[in-house]
Image (cartoon, grey):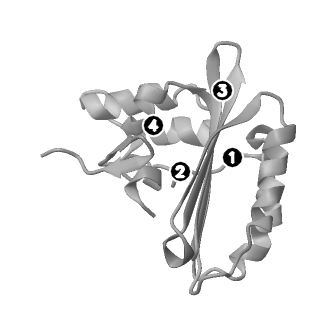
C-alpha cells in the first residue's frame, strides 16, 4: 500500500465496542494469500502501552495518545491475483458506517485505472466537538485494508502512532490528494 494509507494497518476490538462487524469479510480471508488481523480492545491497548518508556519522548506521546482509545481494529487482505474481491464486498462495511450514530464519510479518493487503481475512503465519528473514531478503507486491485479506530482522536497526533504496536511509520505528507515524499 502507498505511504499515505500505511498508517491504516492498526488493529481490532470486541464486537460491542467496535461498531463494525467484520464477519462478513471472512469469505475474503479464504481467498487471501496474506492476512493481517489484529485485535486490540481498550484493555489490550493499555497493557501494550505499559511496554512504552515514559522517558522516551516519542513513546510517551504514543502512550498519551492511546490511553483513551476504546479499540484499534484492522483487516488487511493481500490477494495473489487482481479481482479476488469486488467493490460490493465493501458495501456491508460502508452500510454499517452509514447506519451507525455519528459516522460520516469525509473523503473519498479514486486514483488511477486498471492495475494502478486505488480507492481510499475516510470516515469520522463525531462526538460533540470531538472526533470519536476514524475508519479508513483502502482498496487496490490485489490488496484491501480496513482500519477502524474508536475513541477520542487528535488528528495532528495520529501520525505519532507510526512505528509503535505494529503500526507502520508514515514517512510522507498528503498534499491536495497526492503523496509527497518527505524533504531531506
Q: Which residue is labeled 4 in the image? A: 49
Sequence-first disc among 3 and 2: 2
- How many neighbours does mark 4 have within 10 angstroms: few (below 14), some (14-19), or many (20 or more)? many
Query: Could you tell me which residue is drawn at 78 percent across and 50 percent down?
Result: 94
Asked if the residues shown at circle 3 and circle 2 are in contact, with their CB atoms under 8 angstroms apart, the answer is no
Q: Which residue is labeled 2 in the image? A: 10
Q: Residue at the far bottom: name it.
A: 81
| Tag in front: 4 or 2 | 2
Q: What is the secondary structure assignment of the residue under circle 1?
A: loop
Q: Residue at the far right: name it.
A: 99
- The alpha-carbon separation of the residues under discs 4 and 3 comes to 20 Å
Q: Residue at the far left: name it.
A: 184
Where residue 52 appears, as percent x and y from the top left, is: 36, 37
Q: Which residue is labeled 1 in the image? A: 13
Q: Nearer the viewer, residue 72 or 101?
A: 101
- The alpha-carbon separation of the residues under discs 2 and 1 comes to 11 Å
Q: Which residue is labeled 3 in the image? A: 132
Q: Quadrant of the N terminus?
A: bottom left
Query: Could you tell me which residue is drawn at 34 percent across and 28 percent down?
Result: 60
- The alpha-carbon separation of the residues under discs 1 and 4 comes to 16 Å
- How many neighbours does mark 3 have within 10 angstroms: few (below 14), some (14-19), or many (20 or more)? many
Amino acid at each position: 500500500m502507498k505511504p499515505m494509507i500505511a498508517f491504516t494497518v492498526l488493529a481490532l476490538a470486541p464486537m460491542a465496542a467496535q461498531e463494525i462487524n467484520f464477519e462478513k469479510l471472512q469469505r475474503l480471508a479464504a481467498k487471501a494469500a496474506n492476512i493481517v488481523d489484529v485485535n486490540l480492545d481498550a484493555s489490550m491497548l493499555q497493557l501494550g502501552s505499559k511496554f512504552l518508556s515514559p522517558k522516551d519522548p516519542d513513546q510517551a506521546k504514543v502512550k498519551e495518545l492511546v490511553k483513551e482509545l476504546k479499540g484499534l481494529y484492522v483487516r488487511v487482505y493481500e490477494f495473489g491475483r487482481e479481482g479476488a474481491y469486488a467493490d460490493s464486498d465493501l458495501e456491508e462495511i460502508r452500510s454499517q458506517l452509514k447506519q451507525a450514530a455519528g459516522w460520516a464519510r469525509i473523503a473519498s479518493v479514486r486514483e488511477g485505472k486498471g492495475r494502478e487503481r486505488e480507492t481510499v475512503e475516510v470516515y469520522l465519528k463525531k462526538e460533540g466537538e470531538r472526533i470519536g473514531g476514524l475508519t479508513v478503507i483502502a482498496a487496490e486491485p490485489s490488496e484491501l485494508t480496513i482500519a477502524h479506530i474508536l475513541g477520542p482522536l487528535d488528528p495532528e497526533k495520529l501520525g505519532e502512532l507510526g512505528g509503535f504496536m505494529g503500526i507502520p511509520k508514515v514517512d510522507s505528507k498528503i498534499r491536495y490528494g497526492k503523496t509527497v515524499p518527505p524533504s531531506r
